[in-house]
């Protein structure tokens, strides 16, 4: 479980650096998936790795989204006061 989380973290960081960076982690993930003892365990490992990668991929953009929303709200206030 920890290995799947680590692979997901590594995959998310690689995709943040390059859009095709997830391909660099794919062989290690397939190796880990083939070593899993059953289908249920493999599915759980895939879900953990995917969720970890998605969270890692989204984290750098959280601050910029709040900044953009602040700009939109401020722009609407400035626009409303400038035209009225």
Image: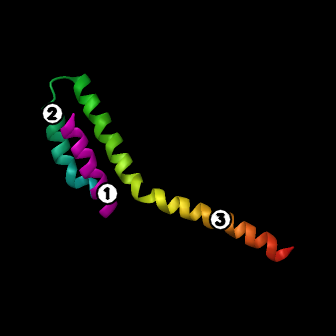
Residue at 55%, 64% (x, y): give it.
Answer: 67
In-image side of 62 versus 22 (left or right): right
Query: Does 40 appear in magenta?
Result: no
Residue at position x 32%, y 34% from top? 47
Q: Give the alpha-carbon distance from disc 1 to disc 2, as whole Å.
A: 23 Å
Toward which corner of the image does residue 73 lie, by quadrant? bottom right
Query: In the rendered view of the protein, which quadrant contains the C terminus?
Result: bottom right
Q: Nearer the viewer, mark 3 or mark 2?
A: 3
Residue 64 is situated, as x and y percent measured from the top left of the image, at 49, 63
The location of residue 15, given as percent across then percent down, is 31, 57
Does residue 17 show up?
yes
Q: Which residue is mark 3?
A: 72
Region of the chain picked out in magenta, as a range: 1-18
Q: Residue at x 27, y 45 (%)?
A: 8
**Label 1 element class:** helix
| 27 sits to left or right of 21 | left
Q: Could you say which disc has been placed on residue 15 in the image? A: 1
Label drawn at residue 40: none
Residue that label 2 marks: 34
């Amino acid at each position: 479980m920890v290995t799947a989380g680590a692979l997901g973290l590594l995959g998310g960081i690689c995709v943040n650096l390059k859009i095709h960076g997830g391909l660099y982690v794919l062989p290690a993930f397939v190796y880990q998936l083939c070593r899993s003892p059953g289908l249920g365990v493999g599915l759980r490992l895939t879900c953990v790795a995917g969720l970890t990668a998605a969270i890692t991929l989204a984290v750098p953009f959280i601050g910029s989204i709040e900044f953009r929303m602040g700009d939109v709200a401020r722009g609407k206030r400035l626009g409303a006061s400038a035209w009225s």
